[in-house]
Structure formats: structure tokens, C-alpha cells
């Protein structure tokens, strides 16, 4: 326990030197009397619960009047503090960081300081995430409060091996980051990798929270593929922790980062495990086929429509009879990009106007574009089908990436025909196989090929059948029954 100030006046001058006098209304320093002893309290208004402070101070005074205070002992103060979360402040930086985090600093006349955790962050209650809805299952989801998020996980995993390792990064933001893992199931190499990368973060703040942290952790640079999986569901996060994955919880973000992951993790959804194994397998196959179709359907249709000598006699109906004045590839590119712009517009449109905007875009613009000859009907049909298939992908980050790959295949096909299409597919596949985030193969278990693991990707086995922890987690104990 260290003495931080020589007097209350020195402590008040220190606080005013940091925040100024009357320059910011929320930085508060007040002098109160505890047991007849002057005490200076520091806090940020809006991050603490004022009613709790009042109640605590009142109870402290009552306890003092009925008890025996140790005035000569600085820690005698703790005896009369009716609150569980009280710690010593070892230096001024620790005291300042605690105050900025929403805690309350108590400075006694003798210069010793204590920190009380009476935080009350503004935020919302847990509710079901919009992007990960299920027909059956829990309706709670992560919020912007890191304490509440860790509690939602702890509620599902009542084991003493569950760890939440707290870190604080950046100079100005001093963002709280919790590394969640199950001791004994997680790889120490992966943990050390995350710890080292967090220590290497040299930045003034993480205003974009988890996404900004992803780029620092995995050096994503200009790679379009998502190297982490985001989830807002505590049950999904808990399931991954049991498999040996690491969850990274960033304060002020309702999404949790899951690592290490592969491409196939982005194609999983909680609904598959909320249904019978056969139904879950059927849903999974539909999702996998829809994902593949969203990538290949439009370029392949363009290949057949623009080079009809590849078509057998039974399929000569494919392709427009009258392609119009605008080249077919230009029609497809305009329509595909246009639908993406409409999607963005729908996101930024106020909810009461979204339906009206969708009707205008779908009926008025689409039909008029066909009538004036800008688009052919088949182009609109296939572009719309691909857009719908893209919405079946659970990961928003992966759906955007697939649209980029689709445009790449379209351009390759337009330039080189059939060779361009297959060369483009080979280039995309080679690129995916070359990715090794966290030194793990991104296409596992397809490349390198693990037959048993691949079967579990394609089939939703009954939960009663024992499955070892995935190889990708590099768990030191792959037996989940121990």
C-alpha cells in the first residue's frame, strides 16, 4: 500500500491539473466527511451510480457510529466499507485509469487512496441479435458492457477452468479487453500469440473496437477474407470455448471475436443444432449449396449465355433471345453492384421508410429498366437469385467477400471465356488455400484433407456421439469427456 499524496489539497490540484477547472462537467472531485474525517472522492459523472454512492456513504457513517474505527490504520477504512469491490491504489496512474473506467477514487487525509468499483455503464439489456436469429433457443445476446458479457458466458459454463484474462490497450482509449478461454482445453501457443499481439498494439484508441482489434491481431491488411468469426450469441461463444477456441471480448462492442477459425466456421449456424440431426444436416447442405451457387451461378450463366455453342440442344433456352443494346456483361455488373447499393441504402434508411424504398426499387426501377431495354429479364432474374442466395450465408463478412469473388469470376469469364472462368475458380481456390491466419490452414479440413473432420463439416452428427476437439484448436486435451 503506497502513499500517493501529502494532503487532500495536493490530490485536488493533481485532479484539476488533469481535467482543468470547469473545463469538463463530468470529471468530479468532491470533499465529504466520513466519521468526521475529510475525504476527497473522484469520479466521472455518468459512469457511476450516484444512488449507490449515497447509500454506501450513509451506511459507512452508520457503521462507524456503532463500531470502533481504527483512525491510525489507513486500512481501518476498509472495515467500515460495506461493499465487496474495494482495492488499494498503488500509484497515481492506476488511480487515474480506474476513475476513467467508471470507478470511484477515495483519497484519505493521510494521502492513501482506495478504488471502489461502483460502475454503472449506460447501455441496453441483453436481447436476441438481429443477424443470428433462431426459431428455438435463447433470446439473449451480448451487449456493449464487458462485465455483462462475461457474466452471460459464465452462466453457461459453470466451471472453475473458465478464465477471463483482462488486458488494457491503447494510449487514450485504454480499452478493456478480456481473453476468454477454458484452461486445459486451449492451446498455450495460441494464447501466447494473442497476448503478444495485444502487447504490440501501439495506437491512441480502438474506436471501432473488435474490428480494429482484428486488424492488429491478425495483420489482415488488404485480404478480403474474414480471419475471425464474430458472434453476438453467448451460446455460440460458449460452444466454441468448449472446443478449445479463444474468445476476445472488447468493451463497448456487442460482438465477440472467436479464434482460430476456418472458412467452414463462417458457414455454421446455431439453428442446425436446435433441430434434429437429420434436419440439421439438411439445413447445412442447403446453406453450403446456396453459398456455392451465390458464387458460381451468375458467372456460369453468363458463360453459357454469351457462348451458346457450349450448350446442348436440350438447354438452348438458357440465355436471352434479345440481349439488347447494352452488352450482357455490363448489364450484369450494373445490376449486381446496383443491388448491393440498394442493400446499403436499406440499412441507412429509417425503418418506417424501408418497405416503401424496397417496393420502389424492386417494382418501379427494376420493371422500368427492363422496359427501356437497359436490362434483360433474365439478367434481373439471375442477379436477384444470387442476391437471395447471398443472404443465406450466416456471416455478413463472408457474404461481402463472395460478392467480390463473383465479380472477379465475371470479369475473368468476360475476358477469356471458359478458360477465364476455370482459371478464376482455380485462382480463388489457390488464394483460400494459401491463407494461414494464426499459422493454421484456412481451408481445413478440406486442405489439408482430414476425412473424419470433413464428414463433421458436411453432416450434423447427433450430440450423443463423442467428437474430439477440432485439430484446428491445437488443444492439448482433445478428449471432451475428460
Image (cartoon, helix red, strand yellow):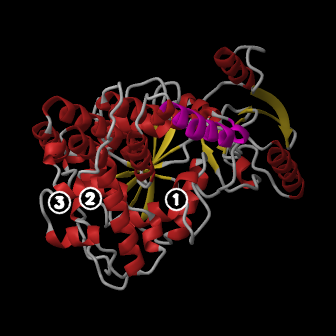
Mark 2 closeness class: few <14, some 14–19, many ≥20 residues within 10 Å: many
Label 1, secondary structure: give it: loop
Q: Which residue is mark 3?
A: 446
Q: Which mark is residue 233?
A: 1
Disc 2 + disc 3, Cβ < 8 Å: no
**What range is drawn magenta here?**
350-369
Q: Does residue 425 appear anywhere in the picture?
A: no
Q: State whether residue 385 is above or below residue 329.
A: below
Choose mark 1 or mark 3, whichever is in front: 3
Asked if the stretch drawn in magenta spans residue 80, the answer is no
Mark 1 closeness class: few <14, some 14–19, many ≥20 residues within 10 Å: many
Which residue is depicted at the point 70% across and 17% down?
16
Q: Which residue is mark 2?
A: 187
Choose mark 1 or mark 2, whichever is in front: 1
Which residue is depicted at the point 76% across and 44% down?
71
Q: CA distance from mark 1 to mark 3?
A: 27 Å
Q: Earlier in the sequence, mark 1 or mark 3?
A: 1
Main SS category, magenta section:
helix
Question: Within the image, what quadrant is residue 167 found in?
Answer: top left
Q: Does residue 453 appear anywhere in the picture?
A: yes
Label 2, secondary structure: give it: loop
Q: Is residue 397 left or right of residue 117?
A: left
Mark 3 closeness class: few <14, some 14–19, many ≥20 residues within 10 Å: some
Q: Is residue 144 left or right of residue 123?
A: left
Residue 395, position in %: x, y?
42, 50
Residue 91, position in %: x, y?
54, 32
Residue 175, position in %: x, y?
51, 36
In front of the other: 242 or 90: 242
Question: Within the image, what quadrant is residue 227 found in?
Answer: top left
Quarter of the figure that contains the N terminus: top right
Amino acid at each position: 500500500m503506497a502513499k500517493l499524496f501529502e494532503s487532500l489539497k495536493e490530490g485536488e490540484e493533481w485532479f484539476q491539473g488533469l481535467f482543468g477547472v470547469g473545463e469538463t462537467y463530468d470529471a468530479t472531485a468532491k470533499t465529504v466527511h466520513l466519521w468526521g474525517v475529510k475525504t476527497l472522492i473522484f469520479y466521472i459523472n455518468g459512469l457511476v451510480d450516484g444512488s449507490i454512492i449515497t447509500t454506501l456513504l450513509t451506511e459507512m457513517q452508520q457503521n462507524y457510529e456503532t463500531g470502533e474505527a481504527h483512525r491510525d490504520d489507513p486500512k481501518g477504512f476498509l472495515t467500515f466499507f460495506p461493499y465487496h469491490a474495494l482495492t488499494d491504489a498503488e500509484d497515481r496512474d492506476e488511480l487515474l485509469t480506474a476513475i476513467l473506467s467508471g470507478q470511484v477514487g477515495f483519497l484519505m487525509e493521510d494521502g492513501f487512496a482506495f478504488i471502489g468499483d461502483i460502475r454503472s455503464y449506460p447501455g441496453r439489456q441483453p436481447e436476441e441479435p438481429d443477424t443470428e436469429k433462431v426459431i428455438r433457443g435463447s433470446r439473449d445476446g451480448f451487449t456493449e458492457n464487458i462485465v455483462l458479457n462475461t457474466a452471460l458466458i459464465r452462466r453457461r459454463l459453470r466451471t472453475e477452468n473458465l478464465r477471463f484474462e483482462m488486458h488494457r490497450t491503447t494510449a487514450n482509449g485504454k480499452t478493456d479487453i478480456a481473453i476468454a478461454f477454458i484452461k486445459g482445453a486451449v492451446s498455450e501457443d495460441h494464447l501466447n500469440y494473442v497476448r503478444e499481439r495485444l502487447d504490440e498494439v501501439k495506437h491512441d484508441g480502438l474506436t471501432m473496437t473488435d474490428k480494429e482489434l482484428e486488424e492488429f491481431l491478425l495483420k489482415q491488411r488488404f485480404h478480403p477474407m474474414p480471419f475471425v468469426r464474430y458472434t453476438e450469441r453467448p451460446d455460440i461463444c460458449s460452444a466454441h470455448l468448449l472446443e478449445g477456441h479463444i474468445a476476445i471480448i472488447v468493451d463497448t462492442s456487442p460482438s465477440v471475436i472467436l479464434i482460430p477459425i476456418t472458412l467452414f466456421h463462417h458457414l455454421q449456424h446455431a439453428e442446425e443444432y436446435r433441430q434434429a440431426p437429420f434436419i440439421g444436416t439438411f439445413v447445412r447442405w442447403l446453406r453450403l449449396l446456396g453459398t456455392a451457387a451465390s458464387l458460381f451461378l451468375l458467372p456460369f450463366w453468363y458463360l453459357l449465355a454469351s457462348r451458346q455453342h457450349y450448350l446442348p440442344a436440350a438447354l438452348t433456352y438458357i440465355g436471352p433471345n434479345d440481349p439488347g443494346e447494352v452488352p450482357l456483361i455490363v448489364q450484369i455488373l450494373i445490376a449486381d453492384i446496383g443491388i448491393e447499393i440498394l442493400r446499403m441504402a436499406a440499412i441507412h434508411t429509417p425503418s418506417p421508410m424501408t418497405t416503401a424504398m424496397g417496393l420502389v426499387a424492386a417494382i418501379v426501377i427494376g420493371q422500368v429498366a427492363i422496359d427501356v431495354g437497359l436490362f434483360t429479364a433474365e439478367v434481373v432474374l439471375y442477379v436477384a437469385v444470387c442476391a437471395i442466395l447471398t443472404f443465406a450465408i450466416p456471416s455478413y463478412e463472408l457474404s461481402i467477400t463472395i460478392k467480390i469473388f463473383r465479380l472477379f469470376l465475371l470479369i475473368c469469364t468476360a475476358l477469356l471465356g471458359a478458360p477465364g472462368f476455370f482459371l478464376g475458380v482455380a485462382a480463388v481456390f489457390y488464394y483460400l488455400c494459401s491463407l494461414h491466419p494464426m499459422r493454421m490452414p484456412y481451408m481445413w479440413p478440406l486442405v489439408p484433407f482430414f476425412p473424419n473432420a470433413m464428414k463433421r463439416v458436411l453432416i450434423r452428427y447427433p450430440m450423443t456421439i463423442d467428437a474430439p476437439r477440432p485439430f484446428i484448436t491445437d488443444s492439448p486435451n482433445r478428449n471432451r469427456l475428460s
